[in-house]
Image (spheres, rainbow, N blue to C red):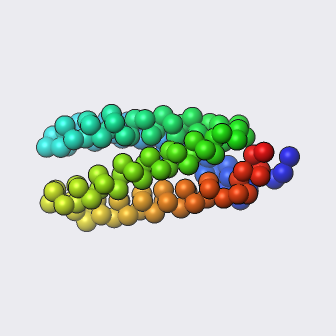
Amino acid sequence: MLNPPCGYRTLAIAGLVSNILALPLGMAAIVVDPTWRTANIAVVAGAVLPTAVVGIVASTALLRWRRWGQVLAIVTLAMALTAGVPYAIVRLVLVDQNRMLTAVLAALLTTASTAALVYWCRPAIRRYLS
């Protein structure tokens, strides 16, 4: 077996931890913000929950060196970007409070998700897992 690519285990563990934490954080977002409760319920139930579940499965598969884990990781990151970017834009436009914090967090999460997506799309990962 080849040596794992640089950052393989670290990113797989980070993905597992972040996806596990996404579940209670999504629930906290519903409880904390009463003005956007309906929108947050819809986003958490329709996007965050499925993305987190697929991400947990993907990270577990990557830690067990399963080739299909790479495909699931790519799908999970694409789902996160597809749901997160429009939600952040709408929230920035419609909500006045904490606009700077929302912008910074949205930029950080979008950058991190894009960087992770580029990492998991590398051919070296597929060669390692085959």
Place of residue 86 in the rendered image (x, y in percent of width and height, measured from the top left): 31, 54
124 or 5, nearer to the observer: 124
Q: How many marks?
A: 0
Asked if 11 appears above or below 22 in the picture, the reply is below
Relative to 56, is 43 on the left or the right?
Answer: left
Q: Is residue 74 left or right of residue 78?
A: right
Q: Quadrant of the C terminus?
A: top right
Question: Which one is nearer the viewer's eye here, 127 or 52?
Answer: 127
Find the residue positioned furthest to the right.
1
User: Residue at point 62% right, 56% down?
Assistant: 121
Give the image location of residue 38, x and y in percent: 19, 37
Above-or-below relation of 12 to 31: below
Residue at (40% x, 35% y) in the render: 49
| Snapshot quadrant of residue 60 | top right
Residue drawn at (19%, 61%) of the image: 93
**Quick check: can you spot residue 120?**
yes
Residue found 77% across the figure and 52% down from its top = 127
Q: Is residue 124 above or below residue 39?
A: below
Residue 117 position by quadrant: bottom right
Q: Which x, y percent locates residue 61?
A: 65, 37
Q: Is residue 63 visible?
A: no
Q: Position of residue 3 (x, y in %)?
A: 81, 53
Q: Is residue 20 left or right of residue 44?
A: right
Report the front residue among 92 and 99: 92
